[in-house]
Amino acid sequence: MVDVKRIQENNYDLITIVGEVDASSSIELDTALSEALASGHKSFLVDCTSLEYISSAGLGVFMSYIEDIKKNNVKLVLYGLNEKVANVFEILGLDQLLSIKKDKEEAKLEL
Amino acid sequence: MFSRKAIIRLSTLFAILSWASLVFTDLSIVYSSTSSVDSSVGEEVPAILLSLFTISIFLYYKYKIEKAESINFVDLLWKVFVTGLLTTIVSLCFRLLLNLLGNTKLSENLIFLDFLYLINLGLVCAFLISTFVVWKRLILYQKSKFLLTVWKVFEYALLISLVYSMFKGTAFDWFHDYYIAILVIMGVFLSANTKWVAFLNFKQKWKGILLIALAMFYLGYFSFTLTGFAVDISVGTNAFQDFRESVFFISLMIFIFVYALFSLLVILFNLPTSSVFEQKLEEVVNFQRLSQSIQTEQSEDRVYDILLESSLSTVLADAAWVEVIENGEKAVFHTHNIEEDEILRIKQHFKDNSIKGILDRGSDRTKNLGKYLSTLKGIHYRSMMTFPIHVKGKQEATLALLKDVSDGFNKENAKIIDSFANQAGISIENFRLLTEALQNERYKEELKIAKRVQSSLLPKNLDQNEEFTLAAFSEAADEVGGDYYDALTIDENKTAIIISDVSGKGTSAAFHMSQMKGVFHSLAQLDLDPKTFLVKANVALSKCLDKTSFITTSYFVINTSKKTVDFARAGHCPTLYYNASSKSWQFFQNKGLGLGILRNSGFENYIQLNTFSYNPGDIIILYTDGITEAKNAKGVEYGYEQLQVAVEKAAKKSAEEIQKELINNLYDFTGSSIIDDDYTTLVIKFK
């Protein structure tokens, strides 16, 4: 039960994740992210304001692109994570590898 | 009381005895009446004996024919014919004897004539009663309560007429005639029941006509012969058993004749339509075959073959084919009386003339394809019908039927074949569902095995120690899970303890969990510090975890000589620690990163080695996120606070009790035994 949309804004792509990412819906997230990265664009903002829950499988999707992002010099910034979701990222340690910001303005500055 | 056989034998015996006595008494009465010698026998005795004889014969045939099971109609009529034939032959033999005697004295002797008459009477009686019983079965073939009642009344009325004939002296003539009239009216009414005729096929109908006509002939022959004798005898005396005066015989003969006539006419009129009835019956049978094919047949091909056969025989087509379309690959044909290249030519012809229809998976099935065939040279078919076979809403096959004559198929044909095609589709769908169900059943079995294997991967008994006790619990959400815990005694002072959670759940998680176990048992015995252990574990797992999988782990080494605990966290849930001396609870918020997230380099930069000293009464609670993220019906998470509250209450208790209270509290909170993620906890309590 997740809806992932990608739109182009100014000099970056905005990816919006709405809903819950669990084992089954993580496939959708994976498809969306891989399409986004395959597009050749280098700057992405990921809007997680409406991301209510993410399971370990969902985290696995983000994790699997970390090395690609580094290698291809892609900038991917997540923002608007609610407390619970942010906590999940932190416990796993993904906050150290992914750029996570409070809101869109802060995130834009990262690009 | 008596068995069927016993009754048949007894009635035979009674019939013979009563007939012999009848002959004896009647002859003596006739003799006495002609020679004016007083007979010692009363006049009513022969009548009673005749009635007894009739009843015995009736019982005989009732048990011989009426009670016999599963006799078809033609067999029943055959019985009538055989009885009639035998009795007629016997009767003819005596007639021959009489003719041989010519005009001798014996042939004019009244007693001799009466003897012959009585023989004929016995024979006709047997024939009439046997036919009567057969008629009864035919009339009551599809019985209603009303029909049954009328029949009973009729039977009892006949019985009463038998009794009445014993006292013929007291009768009034008008009553005699009325009685016959009533019986005949009832007989005619009953004769209207000829439903059995509809169930005969064409051939059986012809046989029926022949047999009934012969039975009527016998009846005619007997009434003629008997009347002849009766007239001859009555010239001399009136003191014999004249059947012409018997209500019973007259009504029975009329009834048998009327029913035979009715049946004959009904069969005759039903002859032209019998093929339609047979066809309908065949349609039903074919339909049933199709729907049953799923239970008995092993393959979809067989269903198509049955469809082909059934359709052919139902509409009497000259040729037919079923084309099975298999995912755009080359089609498979099931054919009858037509070659594959002929089919391809017909299809090509339709395609060339851009005729839309079922053959090219269009939806128009009403189109008369036959008229297009006439423009195709070298094909002698002039009528054609095609039907799609849908499985789960998708056209999977096409049925085509062909006839040599033009306009060879009618609407009814189309309707029935359409329902055949639908039924075939359903059969195939069911067949697939069944196969799938069997497959699923097998998977379930496999999963059960996997569950057994996996549960053996988790330690049954944890290594206990003088310094601390361990208690653990693990429950997987699916058959198999991705949680792992273990403990290993490294040497006399050191024990390694691990808890892991593989990302995702189910089978893939279970495989990775078993890899984690391998890694733990290989590396832990090397006496590595927790950070080095995690770094090496990351290297090992990076080579075998799939792209999106990672494992979170907390690794502890308890040193009982120094009374310290070294630990490191690889992305696992923060450990809950109870300090008994300060009575304070704390979640360790040290740095960490899940195993398998960074696979190339730099992993060690994210791992932190921590150490603390323990005191007796201290508690370490290890758990997986399945516990803290467990939700109740309202969607509220169990969470860290609730976890701490639950174990706080039990802080004084043993490790095992703490573990039990935690799990009980968790299940009470969620209010359901169905869990969404794997639950695992491991409690360490220092002594």
Image (tube, helix red, strand yellow):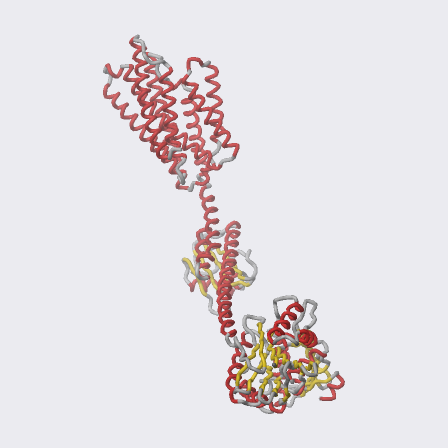
Give whichever of B383, B290 is nearer the camera: B290
Q: Position of residue A74 (x, y in %)?
A: 65, 88
Q: In the figure, is residue A62 to the left or right of B330?
A: right
Quick one: A74 or B672, which is closer to the camera? B672
- The x and y percentages for residue B401 are 47, 56
Q: Nearer the viewer, residue A93 or B128?
A: A93
Observer able to see residue B371: no
- Residue B589 lies left or right of residue B153; in this view the side is right
Q: Quadrant of residue B687?
A: bottom right
Does A58 appear above or below B58? Answer: below
Relative vertical location of residue B108 with respect to residue B257 in this rendering, above or below: above
Give the left or right position of residue A104, taking residue B483 as reference: right
Tell me: residue B7, above or below residue B19: below
Q: Nearer the viewer, residue B382 or B650?
A: B650
Q: Residue furthest right?
A: A105
Q: Is residue B627 above or below residue B334?
A: below
Residue B393 visible within the image: yes
Horizontal and vertical percent position of residue B90:
29, 27
Q: Residue at x 27, y 26 (%)?
A: B93
The residue at 44%/24% (across/down) is B158
